[in-house]
Image: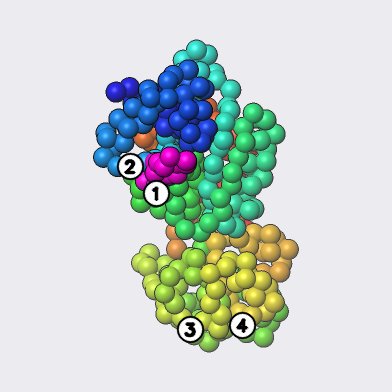
Amino acid sequence: MDRFAAMTAFVTVVDRRGFAPAARQLGLSPSAVTRMVAALEERLATRLLQRTTRSLALTDAGARYLARARRILGDLDEAEGAAQAEHSAPTGRLVVSAPALFGRLNVAPLLSAYLERHPDVSAELSLTDRIVNLVDDGIDVAARIGPLADSSLVARKLGETRRVVVAAPTYLNSHPAPKNPKELARHRLIHFTGLAGPASWTFLADDRPQTVAIEPALTTNSADAAIDHAERGGGLTMVLAYQVAAAVRAKRLAVVLPRFEPPPLPIHLVYPTARLLSAKVRAFIALAVETCDWRFIRL
């Protein structure tokens, strides 16, 4: 069985919504297309399509396989194009994932510049604070903040960011800034759960990690909500430096406890090693390296 031919037949059947229309597009007989899809299902030991006399529908396994098959066939097309020309032009659909606030502030402008430079590419930007599986979720490239646990990914470091504790000057006028993490117990605290799970914050004291239990006045999974409440004088919050860089520069927030901050977290662009690096991904990473300074250390 020609695996690529069978995969192409399967994708075409789904796209054309039937074996006969797919056969016409491929220049084959309906029975030949049917045999190719059946052979593919037999090889995978799973049913990809539910067939009736009047319709067909994807199974759950078929839907997952379809997403990967499209990407494989797309990469094959680009690989063949790259073999014919030393520099293939970026084309197709680029899917990018990033943490919600970082994506809105930094990745979205990068993607806009990329689309202006490469008009033959269409793009999707997925903003989520969960760690996505690039292959399963159909992601071409993702921005990641923090240590990389998945060794199967290729990573390009583009910067780093501090974990900072901030508060509004109006709050600090009536609540003197803590001199060490233990003094946090005297303050109203805003806990952003996207940075730390349980109600605790981690610092560095005498070159050793120090975890401080906290009793938050407000707990939220939204960095925007935590920062907004802090700007309104609601207390101290621990967030990432890029999230409050503008507010600190505008003096709406001030950094406290800088001597106790843990080491900065790296910022990477990552993509899977299992796939050929396509022209569209290569061009996106090149533009990021060329134009992006994601070092959020000085505030």
State the SS at label 3.
loop
At horizontal 44% and vertical 19% (from top left) the residue drawn is: 28
The numbered mark, 2 or 3, whose residue comes first in the sequence reads 2
Q: Is residue 291 left or right of residue 203?
A: right
How far across and how far down the image is residue 159, in percent?
52, 47
Per the model, the C-alpha gap separating discs 2 and 1 is: 9 Å
Q: Nearer the viewer, residue 240 or 153?
A: 153
Above or below, 93 relative to 31: below
Q: The disc labelled 4 sits on which kind of residue?
A: Pro
Tell me which segment is drawn in magenta. 49-61
Q: The disc labelled 1 sits on which kind of residue?
A: Asp
The numbered mark, 3 or 4, whose residue comes first in the sequence reads 4
Neighbours of disc 3 within 10 Å: few (<14), some (14-19), many (20+): some
Q: Residue furthest front?
A: 53
Res 107 visible = yes
Residue assigned mark 3: 215
Neighbours of disc 1 within 10 Å: few (<14), some (14-19), many (20+): few
Q: Is residue 35 magenta?
A: no
Residue assigned mark 2: 47
The numbered mark, 1 or 4, whose residue comes first in the sequence reads 1
How far across and how far down the image is residue 285, in percent?
54, 35
Residue 229 sits in quarter: bottom right
Above or below, 117 relative to 151: above
Residue 151 sits in quarter: top left
At horizontal 67% and vertical 79% (from top left) the residue drawn is: 233
Residue assigned mark 1: 60
Q: The disc labelled 3 sits on which kind of residue?
A: Glu
Residue assigned mark 4: 176
The numbered mark, 2 or 4, whose residue comes first in the sequence reads 2
Per the model, the C-alpha gap separating discs 1 and 4 is: 58 Å
